[in-house]
Amino acid sequence: MKQFILLFTLALLMGAQSLFAKCQSDSDWKKPDGKKIIVCVKGDSFSDRDKAKATCAKIKGSACSTASSFSSSCSNNECYDESGKQHNSLSGF
């Protein structure tokens, strides 16, 4: 019974993961002051990564490489939503 509850809980958590934001970054995502840009979008598809890439370019002022997902949250005070608005932290917005 305990194994069933554990497996059921894991399945729920994995299903809920898609509801949370995916935070994107890559090696060249840095502002002129050297701080890393992290952009959180609502998914992890190629189009979501393209949105994050475009947002990074808007913030950085120059092209950014294609994003690679690294987390479902960020809290470094350099978090941006897909519109480019800065946040202290983002998770599941």
Image (cartoon, grey):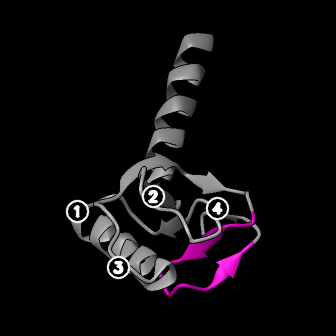
Of the image marks 3 and 2, the number of the one nearer the N terminus: 2
Left or right? Give the position of 18 relative to 4: left
The mark lying in front, picked from 1 and 3, is: 3
| Residue identifier under label 3 | 54
Of the image marks 2 and 1, the number of the one nearer the N terminus: 2
Q: Amino acid at mark 3?
A: Ala
Q: Name the residue: 35% across, 71% down.
A: 53
Magenta region, residue range = 77-87
Say few, some or many: other residues with alpha carbon within 10 Å of mark 1 (under 14 / 14 to 19 / 20 or more).
Answer: few
The mark lying in front, picked from 4 and 3, is: 4
Of the image marks 1 and 3, the number of the one nearer the N terminus: 1
Asked if the residue under mark 2 is in contact with the one under mark 3, i.e. CB atoms within 8 Å, the reply is: no
Q: Name the residue: 28% across, 60% down.
A: 66
Secondary structure of the residue carrying tag 2 is strand
Mark 4 to mark 3: distance in Å?
A: 18 Å
Q: Amino acid at mark 1?
A: Phe
